[in-house]
Image: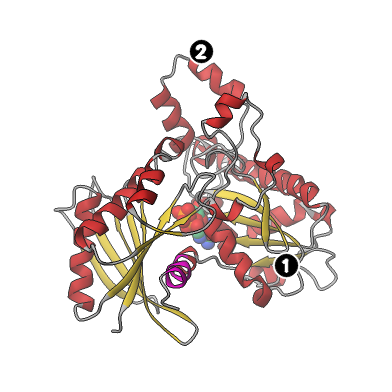
Amino acid sequence: MDDYALVLNAGSSSLKFCVFERPVGEGWRLEARGQIEGIGTSPSLSVKGADGGRLASEKLDSVRNGRDALDALASWLRSKYGGSRVLGVGHRVVHGGARFAKPTIVTPQVLAELHELVPLAPLHQPYNLAAIEAVSERLPDVPQVACFDTSFHRTHSPVVDLIPLPPDIRKAGVQRYGFHGLSYEYISSVLAEAAPEIANGRVIVAHLGSGASLCALKEGKSVDSTMGFTAVDGLCMGTRPGAIDPGAVLFLFQSLGLSAKDVEALLYKKSGLLAISGLSNDMRDLLGRSEPEARLAIDYFVYRAAKEIGALAAVLGGIDGLVFTAGIGENSDEIRRRICESSAWLGIEINAEANATGGPRISTPDSKVSAWVIPTNEELMIARHTGKLLGLI
Ligand code: ADP
């Protein structure tokens, strides 16, 4: 194989990666996509080629932490692409704060600034940065690029990002940031080709996966999003509640005596679809069940999505298009149908046949507002940024 770029998305218990071959002509070519899962419990490596064929599937008993996982990945890469050079490494970094409005080449100064943002994303940022540090120790001459989930939303007006608390608290960084930015940026970048009639209009993109949010796009730029200071805000998610009354959180502390750690675990890991159903955080699983609790969880998920679509439609002054993406948005015709039916008042008329086969256009030809399914590709977005910033494409 030719020289390649590596894209890394390092989390607390997994290391996801993509290998992109050096661009031929226009863009990057995906060579492999994989992950090391179960870091700290029962780690394993699985890798697929661009055609979906299995390249690796093995247990990694010696991997105890993120650094071990990177070592294991490095040794797999050497065994597979031994003669090729790593041209650059692009990282998904959850938080770029107010300052990083664009992907950035990592320097010691940048890394220090990113460490200052750890308190704003304690469950993700430390792992993202540890991966950057581990790569720079092992490959000191390979340039690295940090791509942020927050950057795409830095086009918001000050009113949109305001959290109305006293100035000293806001100075500590308490404002709305928005997340899933790499997904929205990718969708925005392909709209002209995938859905040309709405590309320059007012569009709501629904990123519905384990984490879920909406983004209001005007002429391809983010003007608002349902996620705020953290990725807990907004829509109901697999294990996160989405927007809840902060008074309920106070009640958890004051009346139920929960600790900060308990509340953190509750809000990030034990709420949302999982809490409502008591069965599963996985939408596909819930859709296949008949228990009333599973139906209630799905009803609430759809209700919240439709409600927030209404709110963002108000922000945009009406919409021209609605785009579904990510695991649920790309794969569940039932959820898309129900959200579109709940949003019929906006002028969305779903085409049942097109919806059942996944679109890409899932609204009727006469629908005033068009609806679409467009698969997201955050890793390609990171590869593109990395290539551009490092002068590779
Ligand atoms: P993440 O990348 O945040 O882990 P994904 O974008 O992969 O999440 O989305 C995961 C969600 O997508 C899960 O709730 C899963 O059940 C759901 N999903 C995947 N395929 C389907 C399907 N065919 N029908 C319904 N839901 C699906």
Camera-side residue of 98 and 300 = 98
Camera-side residue of 180 and 237 = 180
Please, which residue is most extreme toward the bottom here? 25
Check disc 2 and give the amino acid type.
Answer: Gln
Look at the image and tell me whether residue 288 can be seen: no
Could you tell me which secondary element the residue under label 1 belongs to?
A: helix
Q: Are marks 2 and 1 in contact (CB under 8 Å)?
A: no
Q: CA distance from mark 2 to mark 1?
A: 49 Å
| Location of mark 1 (residue) | 352
Camera-side residue of 39 and 30 = 30
Check disc 1 and give the amino acid type.
Answer: Ala
> Number of labelled discs?
2
Mark 2 vs 1, N-terminal side: 2
Give the prevailing secondary structure in the magenta stretch.
Answer: helix
| Location of mark 2 (residue) | 254
For residue 320, which quarter of the picture? bottom right
Q: Residue at x 49, y 17 (%)?
A: 253
Q: Which residues are magenta?
A: 382-389
Q: Is residue 214 magenta?
A: no
Please, which residue is most extreme toward the front here? 109
Reply above or below: 89 against 300. below
Q: In this rendering, would 138 be left or right of 162? A: left
The C terminus lies in which quarter of the figure?
bottom left
Residue 110 at what x, y percent from top left?
Answer: 39, 50
